[in-house]
Amino acid sequence: DQQVKQNSPSLSVQEGRISILNCDYTNSMFDYFLWYKKYPAEGPTFLISISSIKDKNEDGRFTVFLNKSAKHLSLHIVPSQPGDSAVYFCAATGVGGTNAGKSTFGDGTTLTVKP
Amino acid sequence: DVKVTQSSRYLVKRTGEKVFLECVQDMDHENMFWYRQDPGLGLRLIYFSYDVKMKEKGDIPEGYSVSREKKERFSLILESASTNQTSMYLCAGGGFGEKLFFGSGTQLSVL
């Protein structure tokens, strides 16, 4: 059973507009959520995170929202830029339960920002 | 800057060969991880280690083993490579339940 799901394999947006990437999770023991960005032939790099005690975290153009009751988080990129074109992975981790210390990843969403 | 280094970017091996993938980190983190990435399947955890000489199975450990003799080095071993192990292998280090720092990856092709 997949514990972290990204239901949209791909997303295409126009430069300057908002990109919204979504992620759902099933394990209530997860208490820390992260987004990573990956370019082809490179390893993922950390982008932004949020603790389960918060519902929003902002860093420049990137904002992550967490809805614990719905077990849903989203990443907003405003404004989107062509350099944002990459694969975005949602990940969840925690310090308790069977997943303690491990990060569980979604399948990724390929974002394309068109000039 | 934090650095995780994987010894090879590209590897081509034959079915049945024993394959070693090496990873070194300079962060002084106890925790190191091996993932594989396949199209449409995201990153799947193979093995991880919380300390020297300690190892834990991840979600897909079959066909793999690991070695952690020194804190900074974590090796992934394919005992007898098979074509379904063709994949991108990613090593990472990080704190317990914290963000991960990844290497550049090793694209392994098993023919």
Image: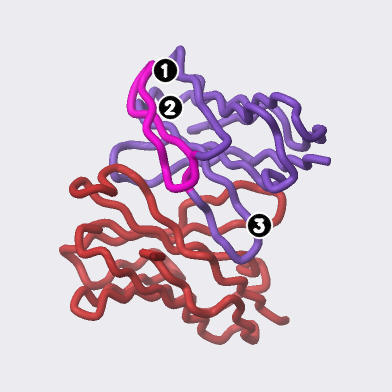
Chain colours: A red, B purple
Label 1 lies in what chain?
A: B
Question: Sequence order check: which comes first, mark 2 or mark 1?
Answer: 2
Marks 2 & 3, CB-CB < 8 Å contact: no
Residue B61: % across, % down: 49, 39
Of marks 1 and 3, the one in the foreground: 1
Residue B43: % across, % down: 53, 54
Q: What residue is disc 3 on? A: A39
Q: Residue at x 26, y 64 (%)?
A: A27
Task: Look at the numbered disc 2 and give the secondary structure of its residue.
Answer: loop
Q: Quadrant of residue B49?
A: top left
Q: Which residues are magenta?
A: B45-61
Tags 2 and 1 on a common chain: yes
Q: What residue is disc 1 on? A: B71
Task: Look at the numbered disc 3 and give the secondary structure of its residue.
Answer: loop
Q: Which mark is residue B27?
A: 2
Callout 2 crowding tier (Cα within 10 Å): few <14, some 14–19, many ≥20:
some
Tags 2 and 3 on a common chain: no
In this rendering, the answer to whether A85 lies above or below A17 is above
In this rendering, the answer to whether B97 lies above or below A14 is above
Q: Amino acid at mark 2?
A: Met
Q: Residue at x 65, y 62 (%)?
A: B39
Residue B59: % across, % down: 43, 47
> Relative to the observer, which residue lies in front, A14 or A11?
A11
Whole-Å distance between the Cαs marked 2 and 1?
Answer: 10 Å
